[in-house]
Amino acid sequence: MKKIILKGFLLFGFCAFAQNSIPEKDFESIESKVIEWRRDFHQNPELSNREFKTAEKIAKHLKSLGIKVETGVAKTGVVGILKGNKPGKVIALRADIDALPVTERNDLLFKSNVKADFLGVETGVMHACGHDTHTAILMGVAEILSKNKDQIKGTIKFIFQPAEEGPPPGEEGGAKLMIKENVLENPKVDAIFGLHINSATPVGVIRYKTGGIMAAVERFVINVKGKQTHGSQPWSGVDPILISAKIIDGLQTIISRESNLTEEAAVITVGKITSGVRFNIIPESAELIGTIRTLNPEMRELILRRMKEITETIAKAYGGEATFSVESFTAITNNDTDLVNQMLPTMQRVAGSENVKITKATTGGEDFSYFQEKIPGFYFFLGGMTPGNETSFPHHTPDFKIDESGLLLGVKTLTEMSLDYLNK
């Protein structure tokens, strides 16, 4: 008798969990809309903290669905709140909406020809990272869920976030500002989901990882002070360019000799060096600017501490001085283990177990990480490369391109994950 009761309980429990499924025809009917929205956003991109028209289109759509809408969040962000017919937890779904200062080189019919001023330079503007697809996918999710409120036990908060690529210098923006303006409160959010289209992952495939999936991103500046002199008499001065070269070499030993790379990857890159005005003058100063990428909090602390020590010590050893400063751009995108384990069956049910694959961490960064510092979060990659392609179209380049047939899986996955999380 106990075995029969137990079997019946498990069967009932499974059915109760799996029955929160949206009919396939509802998804099929939304696909063309999602593609149309994506193409509109792609053709009319806007830079970080300048997503005015994008926000208007999003807000208009959400309002048409009867969703409560708040605009002007973190300057240009839009937040929609959808309450189900039954009380329960609160989940947030996030999409980033900003584009990049990149001039598009594609031959798409909906190619961007938009130009804008970026840091005083006229440049093309392009959705070169897929944020247009993220926005369109979440709009599709909102439409489907708004028509199925009877299946929602709790509340869903749709977060359309500006400035994921970073606000302009001197401005606040992105996830940090949204959190500062209490986007995770009123109602208080219990968990958050997000996705990123990936041009190197085949359509139909989802890639995920527990723990750190994307890196903490820091920008560092090293200012080296020497003593100016004639280029023909280096012994009468202190060469900041030579010191800079020694510092760059020394920084790489932190990665190659001090960081436990069997734990996680780490990167130190010097991307810019500025010094001197003339071939025969040893200048007085030099400036080095670069980035640090880490996937482990302890490794990050070690690297930052050693960079400061090595910078100052090498400069002193060669008769100069140096200062080291760092600015954080993103934290580690850290997927909550319990949340991933809870939602993995849903992802496998939607995409097929064979199409849900564990991935290695990437040294790219995401400010979705700041949401995850406050509440449990799950961030995953959605396939956007057509099966059979030999070459992907890299993100952040003029040639970036994705296959739109992959968008529907994004809509299905976020929709079903939301329902399963709330109704478990």
Image (cartoon, rainbow, N blue to C red):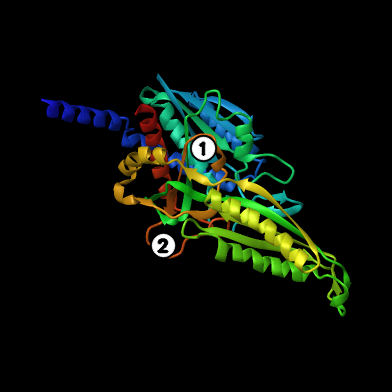
Pinpoint residue 407: horizontal percent, then vertical percent. Answer: 43, 45
Pinpoint residue 130: horizontal percent, then vertical percent. Answer: 52, 49
In the picture, the disc for residue 389 is 2
Q: Label 1 neighbourhood size at 10 Å, few (<14), some (14-19), many (20+)?
A: many
Q: Whole-Å distance between the Cαs marked 2 and 1? A: 29 Å
Q: Nearer the viewer, residue 165 or 76?
A: 165
**SS of the residue at dot 1?**
strand
Residue 181 vertical placement versus 86 (above, below): below
Residue position marked by numbered label 1 in the rendering: 94
Residue 336 vertical placement versus 260 (above, below): above
Residue 28 visible in image: no
The number of numbered discs placed on residues in the rendered structure image is 2
Pinpoint residue 351: horizontal percent, then vertical percent. Answer: 33, 45
Which amino acid type corresponds to the residue marked 2 in the rendered image? Answer: Asn
Quadrant of the image containing the C terminus? top left
Residue 102, picture quadrant: bottom right
Instruction: Say which residue appears at 65% left-offset and 66% top-offset.
Output: 250
In the shown orientation, is residue 237 left or right of residue 28? Answer: right
Q: Report the residue that reaches farthest toward the left.
A: 1
Instruction: Say which residue appears at 36% left-offset and 25% top-offset.
Output: 151
For marks 2 and 1, give the one nearer the viewer: 1
Q: Report the residue that reaches farthest toward the top.
A: 86
Instruction: Say which residue appears at 55% left-offset and 50% top-offset.
Output: 298
In the shown orientation, is residue 128 left or right of residue 200? Answer: right
Q: Label 2 neighbourhood size at 10 Å, few (<14), some (14-19), many (20+)?
A: few
**SS of the residue at dot 2?**
loop
Which amino acid type corresponds to the residue marked 1 in the rendered image? Answer: Arg
Residue 222 vertical placement versus 135 (above, below): below
Q: Nearer the viewer, residue 184 or 139?
A: 184
Residue 43 visible in image: yes
Pinpoint residue 242: horizontal percent, then vertical percent. Answer: 76, 71
Residue 94 vertical placement versus 16 (above, below): below
